[in-house]
């Protein structure tokens, strides 16, 4: 047994009392930063944390990067790393897990990240794991946000984190936000996962209990560097 270091003896580390956002960068520019900042401010207010610093630091002008901005009681902190997810896949496999989101925290990106980690572990080796709410609705992914084509319309599943990448992809496109029950999944005709680390990626297979759905893959045509696979 080891003594707990003083720097870890605080709510951010002990209880996950922190808010964060991950922002894709392109040649030193933080993409969609105002939208990320607005969401981060909302989460900080919800958790009773100080408002995040709005002025970004100077960081390396990487071809593709991932900036993490974290807010705790002690202030706003940042880290920046090269974004290298590997060759672009033709599509990815998603697994429906039985892990549930937190009923109050699902709409916020906080340091209380255990449900997402458990879903990712249960979904392996699939690229992504989808989480449900207590009513059996698919609401979010372990590291990306789902976007579904269901009953002839684009559907944002209600109940999860409001994804900045997904919102940017849907700008100007007709879509609805509504509950999507796990029993609706066999009716999906196409699906995508959306996140700063990967952009908007088509799903080629959805797995789960009594579920093995193969889907056609369609990559989004866009000039927005936040929405493409970083190559």
Image (cartoon, rainbow, N blue to C red):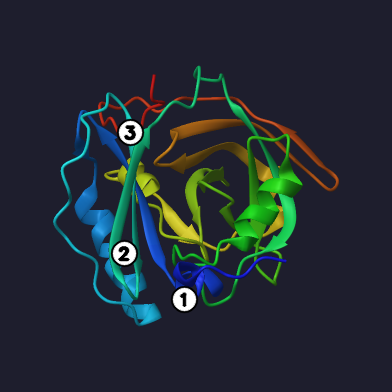
Q: Quadrant of residue 93?
A: top right
Residue 16 can be seen, yes or no: no
Label 1 and label 2: CA atoms lie apart by 21 Å
| Residue ranking furthest to the bottom | 48
Residue at (31, 35) in percent of width and height: 226
Q: Earlier in the sequence, mark 1 or mark 3?
A: 1
> Which residue is under mark 1?
10
Of the numbered discs in the image, which one, if any, rests on residue 72? none
| SS state under label 3 | strand
Q: Quadrant of residue 170?
A: top left
Q: Residues within 10 Å of mark 2 (few under 14, many from 20)?
A: many
> Which residue is under mark 3?
65
Could you tell me if the residues under marks 2 and 3 are in contact, i.e. CB atoms within 8 Å?
no
- Residue 179 sits above or below residue 95 on the image: below
**Closer mark to the observer between disc 1 and disc 3:** 1
Locate residue 150 relative to residue 70 in the image: left or right.
right
Residue at (34, 51) in percent of width and height: 164
Residue 180: horizontal and vertical position, in percent?
A: 61, 58
| SS state under label 1 | loop
Q: Earlier in the sequence, mark 2 or mark 3?
A: 2
- Image quarter of the C terminus: top left
Q: Earlier in the sequence, mark 1 or mark 2?
A: 1
| SS state under label 2 | helix
Residue 213 can be seen, yes or no: yes
Label 1 and label 3: CA atoms lie apart by 29 Å
Residue 84: horizontal and vertical position, in percent?
A: 44, 26
**Closer mark to the observer between disc 2 and disc 3:** 3
Residue 72: horizontal and vertical position, in percent?
A: 36, 70
Name the residue nearer the viewer: 19 or 1. Answer: 1
> Which residue is under mark 2?
40
Residue at (60, 71) in percent of width and height: 102
Locate residue 81 relative to residue 6 in the image: left or right.
left
């Amino acid at each position: 047994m080891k003594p707990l270091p003083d720097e870890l003896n605080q709510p951010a580390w002990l209880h996950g009392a922190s808010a964060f956002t991950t922002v894709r960068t392109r040649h030193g520019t933080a993409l969609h930063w105002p939208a990320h900042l607005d969401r981060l401010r909302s989460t900080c207010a919800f958790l009773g944390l100080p408002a995040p610093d709005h002025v970004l630091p100077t960081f390396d002008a990487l071809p593709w990067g991932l900036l993490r901005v974290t807010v705790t009681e002690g202030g706003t902190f940042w880290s920046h790393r090269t974004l290298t997810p590997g060759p672009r896949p033709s599509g990815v496999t998603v697994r429906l897990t039985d892990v549930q989101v937190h009923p109050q925290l699902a709409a916020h990106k906080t340091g209380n990240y255990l449900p997402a980690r458990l879903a990712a572990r249960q979904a392996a080796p699939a690229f992504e794991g989808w989480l449900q709410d207590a009513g059996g609705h698919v609401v979010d992914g372990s590291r990306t946000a789902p976007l579904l084509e269901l009953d002839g319309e684009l559907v944002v599943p209600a109940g999860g984190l409001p994804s900045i990448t997904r919102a940017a992809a849907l700008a100007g496109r007709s879509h609805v936000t509504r509950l999507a029950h796990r029993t609706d999944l066999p009716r999906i005709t196409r699906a995508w996962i959306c996140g700063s680390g990967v952009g908007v990626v088509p799903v080629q297979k959805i797995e789960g209990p009594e579920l093995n759905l193969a889907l056609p893959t369609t990559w989004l045509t866009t000039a927005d560097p936040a929405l493409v696979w970083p190559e």
